[in-house]
Amino acid sequence: MVTTTSNLSTECRTFEVRPNRSLSREGMIVFFLVVAALTLLVTVRFLLLGAWLILPFALLEIAVLGVSLYLFERASRYSETIQIAPDSILITTRSGVDILREYRLQPYWVNIALQRDPHHWYPSKLLLRSHGECIEIGACLTNADRKTLANTITNALESCRKTTH
């Protein structure tokens, strides 16, 4: 998912790239609690029938579901911010509020490449190249979204180059 904002006074465009998430954190908590309650309800019924061996497996199932939902939620906090200004391009990769990487490039020298797999087995890669550096952006996007982002960034860079001349 890509969101775009523009600031006309500073001639800056900002692109926010995030993975698609259909379930919020609160939704995950509700889902976990409902599944855990139903699992425990069935487990209590079997315990009353004398099948005590079900309890450890039910607790293990709840624990695995909780850990997997936590890891999924943590991975879905990933985002990339691409700020294009007339004097620089700033690419910030975040996981939640923690900044993982930050790159600063000169917009005049940036080349945008959309590399496609020749066999169509793997998704394409959107690369920003400048002075020997190659930075992949939009890895969490679909191929169509990646192509649209490449065109949008190319247009933003061309308009920045025109304003500096």
Image (spheres, rainbow, N blue to C red):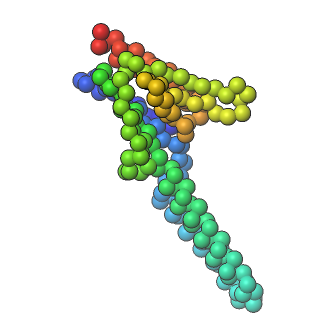
Q: Residue furthest left?
A: 9
Rendered position, 45 above or below 145: below
Q: Residue furthest top?
A: 165
Q: Where is residue 134 in the image (x, y as percent from the top left)?
A: 49, 29
Left or right: 98 as drawn, with respect to 115: left
Q: Hey, which quadrant is residue 89 in on the image?
A: top left
Seen at 56% across and 60% down, the residue is 69
Relative to 22, say whether 68 is above or below: below
Q: Which of 84 and 49 is in front in this view?
A: 84
Residue 151 location, x and y as percent?
A: 50, 21
Q: Residue placed at 73% from the left, 28% from the top?
A: 119
Residue 125 lies, in percent from the top left, at 58, 30
Q: Is residue 5 visible?
A: no
Residue at the image position 59 percent from the left and 61 percent from the top: 68
Does 93 sit above or below residue 124?
below
Q: Position of residue 5 (x, y in %)?
A: 36, 31
- Residue 102 makes an appearance in the image: yes
On screen, residue 65 versus residue 70, left or right, reads: right
The answer to whether 73 appears left or right of 143 in the picture is left
Q: Is residue 145 left or right of residue 153?
A: right
